[in-house]
Amino acid sequence: MKITVAGMGYVGLSNAILLAQYNEVKAMEIVKERVDLINQKIAPIVDAEMEDYLANHSLKLEATDDPSYAYSGAELVIIATPTNYDDANNHFDTSAVEEALDKVKEYAPQAVVVIKSTIPVGYTEEIRQKYGMDIIFSPEFLREGKALYDNLHPSRIIVGNESVHSQTVAELFAEACLDEEVAILTMPSTEAEAVKLFSNTYLALRISYFNELDTYAEVRGLNSQHIIQGVGLDPRIGDHYNNPSFGYGGYCLPKDTKQLLANYQDVPNNLIQAIVDSNATRKEHIASQVLKHQAQVIGIYRLTMKSNSDNFRQSAILDIIKQLRAEGKEIIIYEPTLEEKQFDGEEVVADFEVFCQKADIILANRLADQLAAVKEKVYSRDVFGNN
C-alpha cells in the first residue's frame, strides 16, 4: 500500500518503520531536522530498535516536510501528531490532528485515515461526521525507548471503527510484526478511545500505589523494597511495574489521566481523581524530604525520567525543582542531552565531576553506575534499579 504517516514522534516513526518493511511509506514531519535525519537513516529519537531498523534494514521509507508530496496518492494515512493536554479547557489540544485531516481532505480525500494520536473519548465519531471521511482510531500501547519493539511485538491490536476497512487495517499491522499470533480486537471507535485512556490511567494508578507505599515506608523508617517484594509475590498483583519513583510523567500518563478525569465530568468517581491528586502529593513529599537535608546547593541528576532516554517532557523532577526553587534553594542540573548552559533559569553543569563537587545533595529519579562514587550524596527512591 501507499501509506503516509503524519508526525515523526516515537509513535509515528515507529509505525512508519514498521509498515515500511512491506509498504511504500512517506513520513510527513514539519521539523526539517527530523526529516533530514530520517532520510540519512538516523533515528532522531533514542530507541535501539528504531536505530537498528533505519540503519540496517531494507525499508521503503522517505521523509518529507512537503504536505502535497506526502499526502498525494496515499491510500492510507496514519495521524500520529501530538495532542498535549490543555489545562485551561480540560481537553486534549487536537488542533494538530485536525491540521493533518485538512491536508488529507485536500490531497487524498479517498484515503482511509487511522488516528494513532491519543484523543478524548467520543472524538473520532465527532470528527468523522465533520470531515465525511472513513476515519479509524487505533490506540498505541508503546513504551518510551521501546516503541518499535512494542510495535514488532504488540500486546494487542485494537481497531476502533467497525467498517469494511477495519480488518484490513488490523491485518496490515499484524503482518508487519514479528509475532505469529497477536490478539486483534475491533470495536466502535469510542470504546477504543476508552481502552487507551483506561489502560494508561491504570498504569498511573499502579505507579501511584507503589509510590504511596514507598512514602509510607520512608516516613515510618521501613524498607520499602521488602514490603514491595512481599506484596508482589501474590500472583494477582505480580512482581512488575512496581519500582518507586519521584512520580509519573512523560508523553502519556499525565495528560491521559487528566483527560479521562475530564471525561468523568458527569460520572461518579473517586479513584480517577485520586490518581491525578496522588501524583502531585508524591512530588510534594519528595521535595519536603529533600528540604530536610538542609542542603543549599541541590544537584539534579538527569531531567529524563528513565535511563536510556532523551525525554523529560512532564518529568516529575521539573515540578520538584519548582518547589525547591520556591524555598530559595540553588539548583544545578546534570543532563548530558542538553547543550545549553541553562535550563529554565537553572545552571546546567556539563562536567559530571564538577557537578558532584558543587552539589550538597544529588536527586536521582533513577540510579546509575556513574553515581556509585558519590552515593553518600544521592537521594533516590529507586529501590530495584530498573525503569
Image (spheres, rainbow, N blue to C red):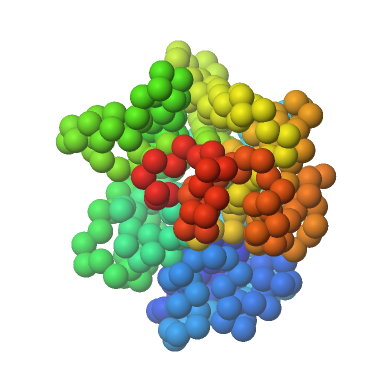
Depth check, front residue: 206 or 365: 365
Question: Can you give x and y, in whole percent of width and height, for residue 179 in the image?
Answer: 25, 66
- Residue appearing at x 59%, y 59% in the figure: 310
Quick check: can you spot residue 111? no
Question: Can you give x and y, in whole percent of width and height, for residue 63 in the image?
Answer: 62, 76
Q: In this view, does 49 lie to the left or right of 69?
A: left
Quick check: 372 above or below 63? above
Give the tally of numbered discs.
Answer: 0
Q: In this view, does 37 lie to the left or right of 381?
A: right
Q: Which quadrant would residue 33 be assigned to in this image?
A: bottom right
Quick check: 183 above or below 171? above
Question: Can you give x and y, in whole percent of width and height, for residue 255 in the image?
Answer: 57, 37
- Residue appearing at x 50%, y 40% in the figure: 380
Question: Can you give x and y, in whole percent of width and height, for residue 267 in the image?
Answer: 47, 16
Quarter of the picture holding the N terminus: bottom left
Quick check: can you spot residue 372? yes
Depth check, front residue: 116 or 291: 291
Depth check, front residue: 270 or 377: 377
Q: In this view, does 309 lie to the left or right of 188?
A: right
Depth check, front residue: 276 or 195: 276
- Residue appearing at x 64%, y 77% in the figure: 37
